[in-house]
Image (cartoon, rainbow, N blue to C red):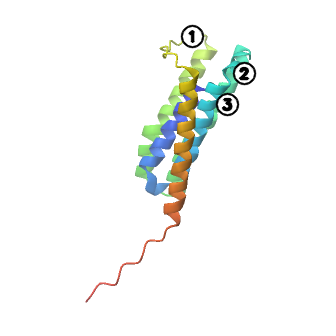
Amino acid sequence: MVIGVLVFIDGGIATLLLDRHFPAVFPYVLLLGAFFGFALLTLAPSSLTSLSRTLQFYYSLAYSLAATLCVVGSDLFLFLAKRRALASGVFALVAAVPAVLVNAFFVNAYVNNVPVEVPQLPKLPIGIVYAILVLTAVLLVALLILVAYYSRKQVPASPPAAQ
């Protein structure tokens, strides 16, 4: 699940950097996917730990594959629909290829029973985690409203140049 969240964040940031080539709301859709995955990890950890190890793997794999397919689909959108080969190459190097390689590594490690050491993060009080989730949701909604407001605002036409 964490890998899927990171892939969604990576794709969202990469599409924000290439904002001229994507619809204005698209990066926020990817970040919304990351928010839902993070919220699920935070708010429902007991539902994930109550599943068997195999079901946990398949659940996490489905989420990670959805994130990776969104990022790879974004890259294909740049290459095929927008005909931007250079931007597509940059996006592939920044987001798509790392997402595919990280997912392939973890699937391979699971299939071959190779333990992957992950550093432990410090435990946060649950109140702080809820505050972070609420703050992130408010910030995401505010950004979506700002994008919608400024994308509808018409830019006045400049006066014709004097000859």
Q: Label 1, on which residue?
A: 114
Query: Which residue of the protein is positioned furthest toward the bottom in this rendering?
Result: 163
Which type of secondary structure does the marked residue at label 3 adopt? helix
Q: Label 3, on which residue?
A: 62
Q: Which of marks 1 and 3 is nearer the N terminus?
A: 3
Tell me if mark 3 has few (under 14), some (14-19) or many (20+) residues whose alpha carbon lies within 10 angstroms of its own. Answer: some
Which type of secondary structure does the marked residue at label 1 adopt? loop
Using the image as rendered, state which of residue 93 and residue 10 is in the foreground. 10
Q: Distance between the Cα atoms at labels 3 and 2?
A: 16 Å
Q: Label 2, on which residue?
A: 47
Q: Distance between the Cα atoms at labels 1 and 3?
A: 20 Å
Q: Position of residue 2 (x, y in %)?
A: 56, 26
Q: In which quarter of the view is residue 106 placed?
A: top right
Whether tag 3 and tag 2 are in contact, CB under 8 A, the answer is no
Q: In this view, does 96 lie above or below 51?
A: below
Q: Distance between the Cα atoms at labels 1 and 2?
A: 25 Å
Q: Which amino acid does label 1 sit on?
A: Val
